[in-house]
Amino acid sequence: MDSQPGSAPATTAEPTSSRRNRRDRLALHPADFVDARYTDVVDRRLARTLTAEDRSEEDGLDPLERVTCRTHRRWLHDCVASPLHVVIVTGTRWCRACECALNVAIDQLAGDVAVRCPSCGGTPATRATRQLVRACRASLATASDH
């Protein structure tokens, strides 16, 4: 099919699923769909988000970008201070200079996230620290969004 001057060229339709990013796909699951692992989670929004992120992780969502925690079955900001969230290899909650775990303080009212090294008092200016702060802020926002 020829396109007329001034009009957009004809293109084949791209499948909807490939046009959406992974975060968009989190919203595609039915509101009542919850994986059997989370049927006892009282907060139904949390259970649905856990289920959606588990499925999106299978599609390539980076586990460090989650707003929920599969291990603790909680919003990330509620359990990020756990020693299980220290990942030395990626530098997540880790001060490489001092070789120790970073402290994370969450201010739920202000929506602020502070990350500090208990040894040197600094905040590592690393990609992992910035990502952790972003994920915690997203977790706070998602949990409080009605």
Image (cartoon, rainbow, N blue to C red):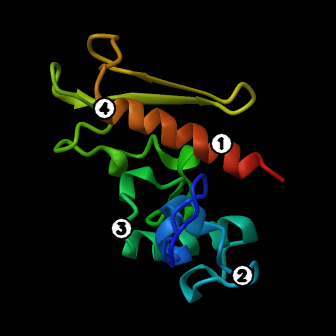
The residue tagged with tag 1: helix, strand or loop? helix
- The single residue placed furthest to the right in the displayed view is 146
Q: Say which residue label 3 marks.
A: 60
100 vs 138, nearest the viewer: 138
The residue tagged with tag 4: helix, strand or loop? helix
Question: Callout 4 environment at 10 Å: few (<14), some (14 to 19), or many (20+)?
Answer: few
The residue tagged with tag 2: helix, strand or loop? loop
99 vs 143, nearest the viewer: 143
| Residue 39 percent coordinates (x, y) | 65, 83
Q: Would you say the residues marked 4 and 1 are in contact, meaning their CB atoms lie under 8 Å apart?
A: no
Residue drawn 64% across the image and 82% down it: 34
| Residue 16 percent coordinates (x, y) | 56, 75
Residue 43 in sight from this viewpoint:
no
> Which one is earlier in the sequence, the residue at label 1 or at label 3?
3
Residue 62 to residue 95: above or below: below
In front: label 1 or label 3: 3
